[in-house]
Image: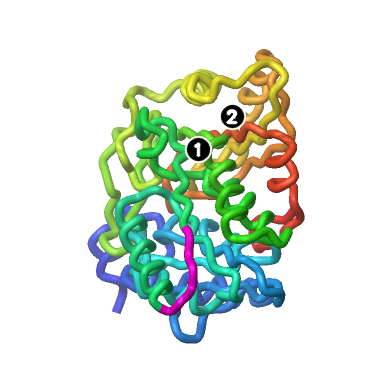
Amino acid sequence: MENQNIVENRAIKRLFNDGFDVVEEMLEGFCKANKEYAELFEEDGRVVVSKKKSEESKVRIIIGGGSGHEPLFAGYVGENFADAAVIGNVNTSPSPDHCYNAVKAVDAGKGCLYLYGNYAGDVMNFDMGAEMAQDDGIRVETVRVTDDVSSSKNPSERRGVAGDLFVFKAAAAAAAKGLDLDEVKKAAEKANDNTRSMGVALSSCTLPATGKQIFHMEDGDMEVGMGIHGEPGVRRAKLESADKVVDEILGYILEDMQLESGEEVFVLVNGLGGLPVLDQYICFRRVAQVLEEKSIKIHQSLVGNYATSMDMVGMSITLVRLDDELKELIDYPCDTPYLKF
């Protein structure tokens, strides 16, 4: 029988079968397409395990969160990056059992580090997973990513968005270098403290289970600062030019970071799923112009879809303030399906 959601809503522009099977079918397809990198843990179909993880006894990196943000999180499982990714339902935290099973799947005797965005469900369930691991004598520490400047004036209360990528990368590099769990956690915390992001949405995304958009937005509108789950931003207005939008977003980021002339940054212009790459490069062009005007150096840059919100039209900008330590960690070689250094 044809999917009922599609029958009821012919306007949907997605390709899936049953809306309640999207996560399992996505993970099956992902692992088949990237069989040299990843496989599902035999005891838990929501835990993706790296086939390129070091056989050495070292700290294991476990990332995770809700699905719908691909290639986050499974796309970053691989060599010198995540050892496992825990995948929840769309926009929903993985369960405590899934979080705990990821530890069981990859622990190598040196402990594990959980890394995820700062959302209430993730905090609760990953913490419960860590307690379950502790009962088995496995030490698990946690770093919550808090890069979204639009979500709170208090840095510790901010949500994690595309800046996840750099916190994960720094921690994974520290683990690959053989540092102990406390040092790996410290590296992740330092990356998080120096990473800021903000986005803009031009449309909602569509939930597969309902076939409906998660919020309403008039054609021709934009919401500056909207989160990747549709959380409210700082303002909604008529769509403006790329340069004006970038200037506004960078204004918030730069005010929060207090970057000085001569400092160096890593830049990510991240597509939220539905914005053409052509547009993303136009946005990056303006980012580069503004930073050059302020004598802030771009060490490296990424442009593309790295942390999405399914079919949402929009983008985000991330800046990472670099020093020699962070530069070495973020530049450290890695090999995953969606990120290679």
SS of the residue at dot 2? helix
Residue 125 location (% of width, % of height): 33, 63
Say left or right for 320 vs 301: left
Look at the image and tell me whether residue 305 can be seen: no
Q: CA distance from mark 2 to mark 1?
A: 9 Å
Q: Amino acid at mark 1?
A: Met
| Foreground of the two, 174 or 218 | 174
Q: Amino acid at mark 2?
A: Cys
Residue at (36% x, 23% y) in the render: 238
Q: Which residues are magenta?
A: 136-141
| Foreground of the two, 291 or 270 | 291
Task: Please state, as top left, top right, bottom left or bottom right, where the N terminus lies in the image.
Answer: bottom left
Displayed quadrant of residue 327: top right
Look at the image and tell me whether residue 201 can be seen: yes
SS of the residue at dot 1? strand
**Farthest residue, direction top:** 293
Q: Is residue 178 magenta?
A: no
Say left or right for 191 vs 8: right
CB atoms of marks 2 and 1 within 8 Å:
yes
> Magenta residues: mostly which secondary structure?
loop
Residue 144 location (% of width, % of height): 45, 49
| Foreground of the two, 281 or 172 | 172
Residue at (52% x, 61% y) in the render: 113
Q: Is residue 140 magenta?
A: yes
Residue at (68% x, 16% y) in the render: 261
Q: Which residue is the site of mark 2?
A: 283
Q: Which residue is the site of mark 1?
A: 315
